[in-house]
Image: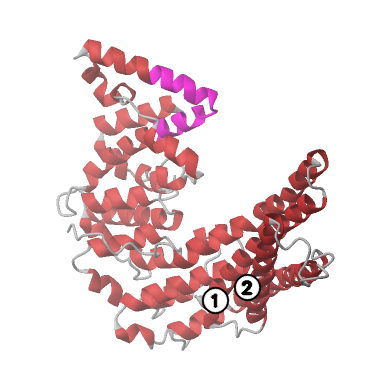
Amino acid sequence: MMIMQDMALDLMKKCPSLALAMDPNDFASPLIALAGLTDVFESGNRLVFWKRWIYNHCIHISCASAPEQVCLNIQNGHEEETIRSVRARLRQLLNLLGCKSLYEMKMVHAQFQQLLHQMCKVIATSTTRVPDPDLFRRSSTTAMFRAVSAGNFEFVYCMGKANSELLEFAYGKRRSIFHSAVEYRQPRIFSLLYSLKKRDAALNLVDVSKNTILHMAGKLSRETPIQHITGAALQMQKEMQWFKEVESICPPFCKEHLNTHGLNPRQLFTNKHQELRKEGERWMKDTATSCTVVGALIITIMFAAAFTILGDNNQNTGFPMLAHENLFKLFIIVDSLSLFSSMISVLMFLGILTSRYEEDFLISLPRKMIIGLFTLFFSIVTMMIAFSTALLLMFHGQHRIVVPIIGLASVPIILFVLIQFHLLVDMLISTYGQGIIDKKIKPWF
């Protein structure tokens, strides 16, 4: 594959006009083909956090890996030899960790990035300077819209930097690339809107069906990054976040503008998201019901245990015989914490079961679910600590019996973490994490 990439790069250097060469049969060009290749760029690969860290900080593509810069390694031979030696050892270590594929991935990304830069040199030419301006416009706009639908951020960014007119073109349906970025839920590409000094023109654009950019946010696209989110409720939350975000920046007329079907953006959103809302309601209710049962069981157990473990009372004082034991005090504390936290958890889940399930998907329901899951997790942990403390009180000094049982007490905690902790983290990130759109981008044209 790398040989093919080198050949493509060499051809592009020798004949730059090939980037826009069109196949008359299927209206294809190298530029359009590259726009649809998302996995050959960094943004098209989802890596877990530790692989992302290795990719960014431990893997370095040397100049020798770039075909156009081989000659740069001739100078400073001793230093280059030392660097190559260190990197070779690092590469061996990465291979032992199973990260050879990450190195190959980054190599592919670097080579296709070079190919993209070569094509951008052609695109940097103004539409008035190319031999066939109409061909340039059709090929480049088709490539841009294909890149947006595929989520190819690097392609859109580099092309926009090379020729800012491409970010302002309207496609066949009189939609800008930002309309498509909203429709396909591509947040990084939509954030490029803030790099435009004349972004009002893109926001005011109305397509042939009289849809504004807010109507695009009201639609439900089945082929979007949102489908990778766990649970229908989180998908519904992300859809509402998109609608609110676009609504906050679009012109006032967009909010009540009617399309050819006589629907304003809010009505379109409600119409298109009915099924997802029902799925979200069902998912929330099922999760809340299951967790409520667990929380109620913990309340019953911990309330009964608080009086059962007391044992016999001192005939003179009336206080429990174990009242002065430190382990007994610890048991009472963790038992109370488990009881109260499980009560809070049950109340939160009951609040979910009685919610309206409309605007609540944005903040209210996720917040209740986060509090409910966190307090339920805390109650399970403190319940296991209380159980272990009670064993230590009953079998004082008999470590051969107590230690294995305490070890088994950690199994429910581990199981809960494996089952629900990922959901809790996803909800925290979705509700309180960074917003969908990066508004800190400074205008660069």
Check if mark 1's residue and mark 2's residue have beta carbons within 8 Å.
yes
Location of residue 210 (image quadrant) = bottom left
Q: Residue furthest top?
A: 78
Amino acid type at image mark 2: Gly
Where residue 363 sits: x, y (%)? 50, 75
Relative depth, front residue between 14 and 193: 193
Relative depth, front residue between 440 and 193: 440
Q: Is 268 left, or right, of 19 in this rendering? A: right
Location of residue 182 (image quadrant) = bottom left
**8 vs 341: above or below:** above
Write the residue at 37% across / 78% down: 247
Tell me the chief SS of the magenta region: helix
Protein image colouring = secondary structure
Q: How dense is the environment of label 2, judged by Cα within 10 Å: few (below 14), some, or many (20 and up)? A: many
What is the magenta range? Answer: 87-108
* Residue linked to disc 2: 280
* Residue linked to disc 1: 361
